[in-house]
Amino acid sequence: MKLLICCWLVLVANSAMAMNFYMVIVDSLNVRQGPDFTWDVITKAERNQLVLETQRDGVWSEIFYLDPNKQKVKGWVHNNYIKPQTLTPNEGGNSKFNIKVSAEQPVCDGQSMITGESLCYLDVNFSVRSRAASEGSILVSCWADFVASGQEHIQPVQAKVSQNYVLQNGRVADTVRLRAGLKQQLGSKGLNVAYYNCTVN
């Protein structure tokens, strides 16, 4: 069984630009290469697709999301067809588990000696409580999309960690560190947001 834990937006306090989540509100929304109707359509976003707005140019929004095939999509849409969203924790509903997730601020603490890339990470805290079984093992997978400001555009980088845990008295809690190398050199103030979630198998 796979259970979606939650999706959050982590904002850095000194970020130069705030980024927000939006929902597509039309059946099929053209995603274009640039902020104008003259740009080519690169794909279509379906109704209820959750997207991250990475920048805005008038009535056009540059968005980023993972499509149903887990492929990264980045392009421009007219912002009349997307609606702001507030993300709240999902504690599992009627699932086998009660789950809580939180995250610290993303951190960049230096550059790789080999590649010169910034070494950045996000610490994600989670706790799992079984509604039924008091023991057993589970697989927890967490991932994050790090979003850093480039000179001309936003470039998301994804990191993922999966780990097995043994439930003790029906509970387990841990902190996992998601690491990513970013192609430009920057400090933590240049890392604007991280979009993250976790699943339990």
Image (cartoon, rainbow, N blue to C red):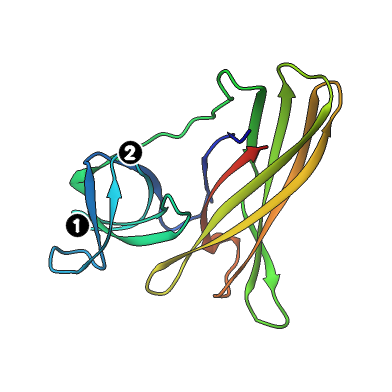
Residue 178: x and y, percent? 67, 54
Note whether 40 is above or below 60 in the view shown.
below
Residue 33: x and y, percent? 26, 68
Residue 135: x and y, percent? 84, 24
Amino acid type indicated by mark 2: Asn
Front residue of 53/68: it is: 68
Q: According to the image, label 2 marks what residue?
A: 48
Q: Residue 171 carries which label?
A: none
Front residue of 8/47: it is: 47
Q: Residue at x 56, y 75 (%)?
A: 183
Q: According to the image, label 1 marks what residue?
A: 58
Secondary element at tag 2: loop
Quarter of the view holding residue 199:
top right
Mark 2 vs mark 1, CA separation in Å: 23 Å
Note whether 115 is above or below 36 in the view shown.
below
Taking the image as shown, residue 98 lies to the left or right of residue 87, namely right
Residue sitting at the far bottom: 114
If the image is split into quadrants, where does the N terminus sit?
Answer: top right
Quarter of the view holding residue 152:
bottom left
Say which label, 2 or 1, has the lower sequence index.
2
Q: Which residue is drawn at 80% across and 22% down?
A: 170
Crowding at dot 1, Cα within 10 Å, few <14 / some 14-19 / many 20+, comes out as few
Secondary element at tag 1: loop
Residue sitting at the far front: 1
Frontmost of labels 2 and 1 is 2
Residue sitting at the far right: 168
Residue 18: x and y, percent? 41, 51
Amino acid type indicated by mark 1: Gly
Taking the image as shown, residue 136 lies to the left or right of residue 140, namely right
